[in-house]
Image (tube, rainbow, N blue to C red):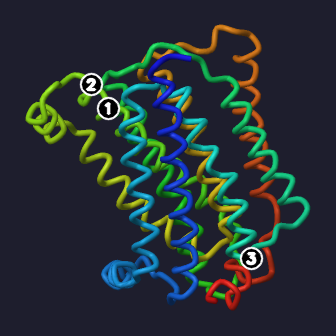
Amino acid sequence: MSAASVTGIPLALLATTAYNVGLVLEKRALAQMQALDLRRLGRVVVSLATSRAWLAGFALMLTGLACQTVVLTVEPVSVVQPVLASGVVLVLVLSRLVLRERLRASEAWCVAAIAVCLVALALSATSAEVGRHASPGAMAAVMVPSVIVGLLAAAGPLLAHRRRPGAPMTGVWPGVGTGLLYGVAALAIKGLSGILADHQTATGIAVGVLESPYLYVLGGCLAVAMLLFQAALQASRASIFVPVSAVTGSVYFIITGTWLFHERLPASPGQLGLRVAGIALTVLILISLSRQAPESKPASGDLAEMRR
């Protein structure tokens, strides 16, 4: 293991722990709010900004993102992203113990398969050289359509759910949509990490970051994805929505990040096979989950238990 991995991987674990514990805190806070209506953005922002419980979760998420930015400067995408995505396991445990959510047998098998995908992706990680730069044109060609598809996938079901507030929602397609948006944000973070590596002074870093379009792509994607994510998190079960969003973002980032930043694929046939199998299984899981009927109970589970 390299010297970078000794510090990079623990920092990635800290990042994913802080991020996903923050998610659970947000879910608990959202269960006590009125339904978020994205057509009234001002009211949504006020509701979130005045909830101390939600702000506590949001602060933990920001801490996780900050740690992720740092760790991407010392480790390749193929090493960092599986570690970050492993936080899904923590979400599943906390959603059962804290949020009192329950999965049907078919859903449980799909979620377990998501965990298998994450393990396969983690085992396929290599110690390849860290990629720090990507072609701006190639980045734009990947980011723009990804954002469009992500918006359509996430916003469509949420708008339909808003028209039928009593109808259940699985959260699969919003999970795919927000996963794509967060994946684009992760690409922007990776782009910014190259600036951190290229400059030695605080002034150079500040100027480089402010001049980079990645900063504004990151800010826009995070803002839109966060609002869509919060609305979907409130309307669906965290134990389904969060893993789908996480594994979508993970697979998207591994595929596009490895290609855009010229990081090598695993040289070992076994590791390459795990990488391909993990990605293929993820696609099959998402198809399976999207075909399952929504739960008949409220998406937030036992709200009385959550509010205690």
Give residue 173's quadrant in the image. bottom right
Q: Mark 1 points at which residue?
A: 193
Percent of width and height locating residue 246: 59, 49
Residue 10 in percent (x, y) is at 52, 37
Mark 2: which secondary structure? helix
Q: How many residues crowd mark 2 within 10 Å: few (<14), some (14–19), many (20+)?
A: few
Q: Is residue 48 left or right of residue 169?
A: left
Disc number for residue 197 = 2
Q: Which amino acid does label 1 sit on?
A: Ser
Residue closer to the observer: 185 or 27: 27
Q: How far apart are marks 3 and 1 (CA)?
A: 38 Å
Q: Any mark on residue 104, and which?
A: none
Q: How far apart are marks 2 and 3 (CA)?
A: 44 Å
The image shows residue 225 at horizontal and vertical percentages of: 43, 59
| Closer to the camera in the image, 236 or 307 | 307
Q: Are marks 2 and 3 in contact (CB under 8 Å)?
A: no
Q: Earlier in the sequence, mark 2 or mark 3?
A: 3
